[in-house]
Image: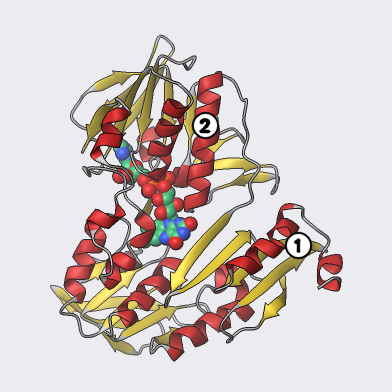
């Protein structure tokens, strides 16, 4: 049982549903209301939207994370297709208001409202211009890809690079545009980023790097992308992948502290008793970094969910998150994995393999500390070195012993 009788979870995707599943697994049988804006039969694997769903090797049915029976067993008051619009913290009554006017009282609240795709001003409102965050986004993009000739992907971060790889895997032409000199450069740095530039080029992606987007052109429908150097790329389909922003505006004015995500301690607790936040919408204190960080990755959402469920059951901060950030990305059927949070300017040492090879493991370091490990097509290599990141091992000793 939880100290809190009425728990409301806002956001019914990975993080929110994991909190609920963990609460039930730990024996909670109290009332749980789930408010979810997406009207889907189950949370789905968002990570495959840019990968298997786009290439056509998966369909929506393959992505659902729970069966209808599993959801029924959780015994929830389900409010799907409903959006929380505001939060009121009157001392006598804490309530969430929904977009249909319903007011729900709660003893504990979990904010799990995730991120939305950023929409830079140049996007405008032309047809044929897409972002990728939700299943409907992905299905609309996949449908339009069927008849697209000139695809331009703006943003060579992980989602943009994955979309470009999926378009090439479908056998269609694609140009990837980014102001950085390499794909993934802001995360992985120039040396490893160059490997991804070569990987894309060798699979036929056209790269336009070191140049930004001035405007999208067209009359009703997009027909070109004007770059900041004045050149125009023909385009009948544009995908903009320039990062995500936390969905927190419904908390404005409530008293819950928000600054690029809901600010939390290392147990997921906000500044308001009984209110927690998890996943992409949350910015937890990390002992590892000595700061509050927001991590938009699958593993982070599930780990935080477990911690919050344990703390909801205990009614105090029983658990904290000590894990170091980690994520994966799949491009051209090769998996890249990363543990840690290196800066692009960190030193890089290849512990096995090298850029351009079939597989490699790269260690990152700064100020004589190991800050991250990145493996390309080498899960065993990652396992071998990730403890150095967790332990903040000495960089000189780590590379000296290699
Ligand atoms: C295309 C794509 C590919 C990705 N690939 C990878 C990958 O390879 N590896 C990796 O580690 N991570 C990847 N990620 C990131 C990963 O999917 C996210 O970290 C994860 O989905 C976060 O889960 P979440 O529940 O916090 O947020 P979300 O999944 O964003 O869910 C938030 C939910 O809250 C709902 N919501 C929002 N506002 C309200 C409101 N006011 N009221 C009610 N409901 C609301 C939303 O509709 C949504 O259903 C990818 C993400 C995308 C978009």
Q: CA distance from mark 2 to mark 1?
A: 29 Å
What is the number of the mark on residue 347?
Answer: none
The picture places residue 75, in percent across and down from the top left corner, at: 29, 25
Q: Which residue bears the numbered disc 1?
A: 370
Q: Is residue 107 left or right of residue 312?
A: left
Q: Check the image and report above or below for 161 versus 95.
A: below
Say which element carries label 2: helix
Crowdedness of circle 2 by 10 Å Cα count: few (<14), some, many (20+)? many
Q: Is residue 245 left or right of residue 340?
A: left
Residue at the image position 41 percent from the left and 14 percent from the top = 5
Ligand 1 within 8 Å of the CB at mark 1? no
From the viewer's perspective, is residue 73 above or below residue 58? above
**Picture quadrant of residue 364:** bottom right
| CB under 8 Å between discs 2 and 1 | no
The furthest residue to the left: 220
Crowd tier of the residue under label 1, counting other residues whose Cα lies within 10 Å: few below 14, some 14–19, many 20 or above? many
In the foreground, 364 or 127: 364
Towards the viewer: 134 or 318: 318
The percent position of residue 255, horizontal first and vertical second, equals 47, 27
Q: Position of residue 41 (x, y in %)?
A: 22, 42
Which residue is at the front of the view, 60 or 190?
Answer: 60
The residue under the point 35% across, 36% down is 250
Where residue 325 sits: x, y (%)? 59, 53
Question: Quadrant location of residue 18?
Answer: top left
**Residue 176 shows in the view:** yes
Q: Which residue is mark 2?
A: 308
Tag 1 secondary structure: strand
């Amino acid at each position: 049982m939880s100290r809190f009788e009425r728990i409301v979870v806002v956001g019914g995707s990975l993080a929110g549903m994991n909190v609920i599943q963990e609460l039930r697994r730990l024996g909670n049988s109290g009332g749980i209301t789930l408010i979810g804006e997406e009207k889907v039969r189950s949370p789905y694997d968002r990570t495959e939207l840019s990968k298997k769903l786009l290439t056509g090797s998966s369909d929506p049915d393959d992505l659902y994370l729970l069966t209808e029976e599993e959801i029924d067993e959780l015994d929830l008051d389900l409010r799907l297709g409903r959006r929380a619009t505001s939060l009121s913290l009157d001392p006598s009554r804490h309530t969430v208001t929904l977009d249909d006017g319903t007011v729900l009282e709660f003893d504990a609240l979990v904010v799990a409202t995730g991120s939305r795709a950023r929409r830079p001003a140049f996007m405008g409102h032309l047809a044929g211009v897409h972002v990728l965050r939700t299943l409907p986004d992905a299905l609309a993009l996949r449908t339009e890809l069927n008849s697209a000739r000139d695809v331009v992907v703006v943003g060579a971060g992980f989602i943009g690079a994955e979309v470009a790889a999926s378009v090439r895997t479908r056998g269609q032409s694609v140009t990837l545009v980014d102001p950085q000199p390499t794909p993934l450069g802001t995360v992985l740095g120039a040396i490893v980023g160059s490997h991804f530039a070569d990987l894309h080029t060798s699979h036929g992606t056209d790269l336009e790097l070191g140049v930004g987007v001035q405007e999208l052109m067209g009359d009703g429908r997009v027909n070109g992308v004007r770059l900041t150097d004045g050149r125009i790329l023909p385009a009948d389909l544009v995908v903009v992948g320039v990062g995500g922003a936390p969905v927190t505006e419904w908390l404005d004015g409530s008293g819950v502290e928000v600054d690029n995500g809901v600010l939390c301690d290392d147990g997921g607790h906000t500044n308001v008793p009984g209110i927690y936040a998890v996943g992409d919408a949350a910015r937890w204190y990390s002992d590892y970094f000595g700061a509050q960080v927001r991590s938009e990755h699958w593993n982070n959402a599930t780990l935080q969910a477990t911690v919050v469920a344990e703390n909801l059951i205990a009614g105090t901060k029983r658990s904290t998150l000590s894990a170091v950030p980690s994520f994966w990305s799949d491009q051209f059927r090769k998996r890249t994995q990363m543990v840690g949070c290196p800066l692009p300017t960190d030193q890089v040492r290849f512990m096995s393999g090298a850029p351009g090879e079939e597989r490699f493991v790269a260690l990152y370091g700064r100020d004589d500390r190991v800050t991250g490990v990145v493996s390309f097509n080498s899960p065993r290599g990652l396992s071998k070195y990730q403890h150095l990141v967790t332990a903040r091992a000495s960089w000189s000793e780590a590379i000296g012993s290699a």
